[in-house]
Image (tube, rainbow, N blue to C red):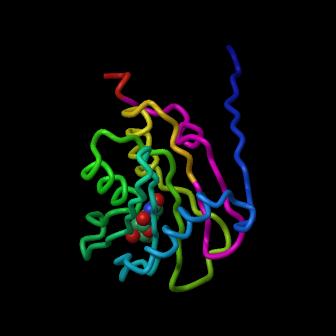
């Protein structure tokens, strides 16, 4: 028997302490929130991806009366990026949220499916994707790699 341990570190910032490029990416995620189509949950999510070529592309959650058909913001943004720039890796993704029922005062992490979606682009382009998270208020959380928040991930190396 062997006990093993996985550790990872992450950083927290006040919005004002963020490097300017990260603050701009996060602001892009916050700005695009208004385009979310979330009439069923009232929970709007905005995502902004920074590509290796410097382009910033955004996405929002798009819900559906048939609930499971709805799309997460991260998946929307990744699909836009990969459709427009299929040869270009993703450096960072900023994600922000807004609820119609309460003020979200903490960063909200991507769902499991979106972690797997993000991992695909990390492994596809062989680079870490930094994840920058913020609620409506409160601290910003910065995670260096998708693999940090998806231990024991499944990837193309298994196929
Ligand atoms: N949502 C996202 O857009 N990203 C996530 O990582 C988690 C959840 C959306 C899906 C749905 O429209 C709403 O948030 C509530 O679950």
Q: Residue furthest bottom?
A: 101
Residue 71 coordinates in the image, percent (x, y): 32, 63
Residue 20 position by quadrant: bottom right
Q: Quadrant of ligand 1?
A: bottom left
**In the depicted view, which residue is nearer to us: 12 or 81?**
81
Q: Is residue 17 left or right of residue 155?
A: right
Q: Residue furthest top?
A: 1
**In the depicted view, which residue is nearer to us: 11 or 26?**
26
Exactly how many numbered labels are in the figure? Answer: 0
Q: Residue at x 69, y 16 (%)?
A: 2
Q: Residue at x 59, y 58 (%)?
A: 21
Residue 156 coordinates in the image, percent (x, y): 35, 27
Residue 43 coordinates in the image, percent (x, y): 47, 76
Residue 64 position by quadrant: bottom left
**Quadrant of the drawing holding the C terminus:** top left
In the image, is residue 71 above or below residue 30? above
**151 in the magenta segment:** yes
Span shown in magenta: 132-155
In the image, is residue 141 above or below residue 106? above
Q: Residue at x 44, y 55 (%)?
A: 49
Q: Is residue 153 left or right of residue 36?
A: right
**Quadrant of the drawing holding the N terminus:** top right
**In the depicted view, which residue is nearer to us: 67 or 84?**
84
Residue 109 coordinates in the image, percent (x, y): 56, 57
**124 in the magenta segment:** no
In the image, is residue 99 above or below residue 93? below
Q: Residue at x 36, y 56 (%)?
A: 75
């Amino acid at each position: 028997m062997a006990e093993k341990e996985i550790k990872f570190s992450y950083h927290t910032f006040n919005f004002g302490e963020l490097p300017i490029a990260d603050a701009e990416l996060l602001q892009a995620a916050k700005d695009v929130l208004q385009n979310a189509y979330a009439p069923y949950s009232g929970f709007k999510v905005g995502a902004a991806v920074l590509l290796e070529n410097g382009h910033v592309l955004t996405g929002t959650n798009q819900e559906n009366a048939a609930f499971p058909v709805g799309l997460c913001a991260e998946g929307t943004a990744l699909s836009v990026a990969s459709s427009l720039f299929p040869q270009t890796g993703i450096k960072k993704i900023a994600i922000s949220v807004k609820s119609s029922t309460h003020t979200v005062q903490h960063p909200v992490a991507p769902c499991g499916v979106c972690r797997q979606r993000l991992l695909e682009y990390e492994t596809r382009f062989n680079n870490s994707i930094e994840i920058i998270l913020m609620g409506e208020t409160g601290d910003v959380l910065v995670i260096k790699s998708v693999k940090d928040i998806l231990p024991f991930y499944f990837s193309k190396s298994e196929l």
